[in-house]
Image (cartoon, rainbow, N blue to C red):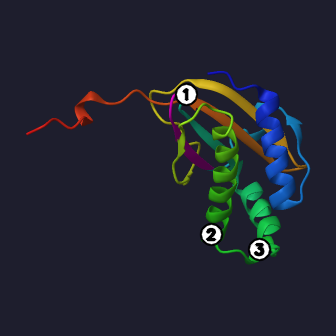
Amino acid sequence: MTLASTEISEIVAEVWGAMLGLETEVADPDTLGGLPHLTGSVDVTGPHGCLVSLSVSDAAARAFAAAMFAADPHELADDEVVDAVGELTNMVGGNIKSLLPEPSRLSLPVVVPGHGVPAGTDVLNRVALSTGSDAVLITVRSRPAPDPSQEKHPS
């Protein structure tokens, strides 16, 4: 599966513009550095399945949530910030899914602290974008191979 960086950048630019009223520009993928992060992920299953993750610093997550909910970033509850990251992840993942062959399905987003890199995956593409002082890192990974020990066997 090939997904061009320009396609990912365009998707994020559209989502950020529509949902947050923010413009994005390409940034250095190392922009996020060692800051505390939140990572939202969705699983796309189908002929060319993948994992799509969106990592943001805690400060960026709060800024994006404030823009999404038209609220003061300091007055947002933590669950509102997590919800915003989940919704942005869902929208980016859904748009990436639309570029893949059918039938494809999108899982519900999961948001975790840290980078949340799943074991057994390879990075297919990585794109960093900034909205001024805040950055987002979108990573598309191969889906992990199924764990044979977890397969169900008829009794």
Farthest residue toward the left? 155
Camera-nearest label, 3 or 1: 1
On screen, residue 23 versus residue 142, left or right, reads right
Image location (x, y in percent) of residue 127: 75, 33
Quarter of the picture containing the C terminus is top left
Residues at marks 1 and 2 touching, judged by CB atoms closer than 8 Å: no
Label 1 element class: loop
Question: Mark 3 is on which residue type?
Answer: His
Image location (x, y in percent) of residue 107: 51, 49
Tag 1 residue: 48
Image location (x, y in percent) of residue 120: 45, 27
Farthest residue toward the bottom? 75
Q: Is residue 152 highlighted in magenta?
A: no
Residue at (48% x, 36% y) in the render? 118
Quarter of the view holding residue 147: top left
Q: Main secondary structure of the magenta part?
A: strand
The label shown at residue 74 is 3
Disc 3 and disc 1: Cα gap in Å?
41 Å
Residue at (76% x, 35% y) in the render? 8
Q: Is residue 40 highlighted in magenta?
A: yes
Q: Residues within 10 Å of mark 3 (few under 14, many from 20)?
A: few
Camera-nearest label, 1 or 2: 1
Whichever of callouts 1 and 2 sits on the residue coming sooner in the sequence is 1
Tag 2 residue: 78
Near-viewer residue (28 or 36) = 28
Farthest residue toward the front? 102
State whether residue 112 appears in this view: yes
